[in-house]
Image (cartoon, rainbow, N blue to C red):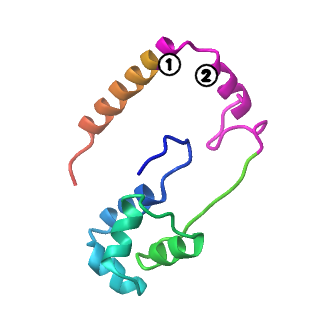
Amino acid sequence: MSDGSKTPSAGRLLRRARRRHSMGQSALAERAGTTQAQVSRIERDLVSPSLTTLETLLAAMGETLSLSARPLDAPPPGGGNTTIRELRADFELLTPEQRLEQAIELSGMQAELAASRPLQ
């Protein structure tokens, strides 16, 4: 269940980590001391896990959760000289048509990148 917010999905994060480790939901649940049904509900974003639960599930796969808060006036993660606030302001000035055009362009780039990566 996605609400369209810009917050990353805990379910998507967990599912990607589990797949990176080629692990099934049942195996993860057993390692983490929960049920396969609970892992499934989290991955489908039907429930929002606590940070403790998410940390436990990731730790069961040998991963850790890393969170940080940044002021909007700080440079974006990974560097750059434009603040997050400036990037958002530029985006908010776009018309809906320009936003859609930008999304289509980015989607095309993502598809090209995905096609160029070797299958695992």
Q: Position of residue 22 (x, y in %)?
A: 26, 68
Residue sitting at 69 percent across and 23 percent down? 89
Residue sitting at 73 percent across and 31 percent down? 85
Q: Quadrant of residue 32?
A: bottom left
Establish if 24 lies above or below 104.
below
Which of the labelled discs sits on residue 99, or is there none? 1
Establish if 40 lies above or below 111.
below
Q: Is residue 79 visible?
A: yes
SS at badge 2:
helix
Residue 81 magenta: yes
The CA distance from mark 1 to mark 2 is 8 Å
User: Is residue 26 toward the left or the right of residue 96 in the image?
Assistant: left
Q: Give the tally of numbered discs.
A: 2
Q: Position of residue 86 (x, y in %)?
A: 72, 26
Residue range of the region highlighted in magenta in the rendering: 71-99
The residue that label 2 is drawn on is 91
Quarter containing the C terminus: bottom left
Quick one: 37 or 78, which is closer to the camera? 37
Q: Quadrant of residue 19?
A: bottom left
Query: Which amino acid type is shown beneath numbered disc 1?
Result: Arg
Residue 60 magenta: no
Q: Position of residue 41 (x, y in %)?
A: 37, 66
Query: Which amino acid type is shown beneath numbered disc 2?
Result: Phe
Q: Are marks 1 and 2 in contact (CB under 8 Å)?
A: yes
Q: Is residue 83 visible?
A: no
Residue sitting at 48 percent across and 71 percent down? 63
| Among the two numbered marks 1 and 2 on one chain, the one whose residue lies closer to the N terminus | 2
Q: Position of residue 10 (x, y in %)?
A: 48, 59
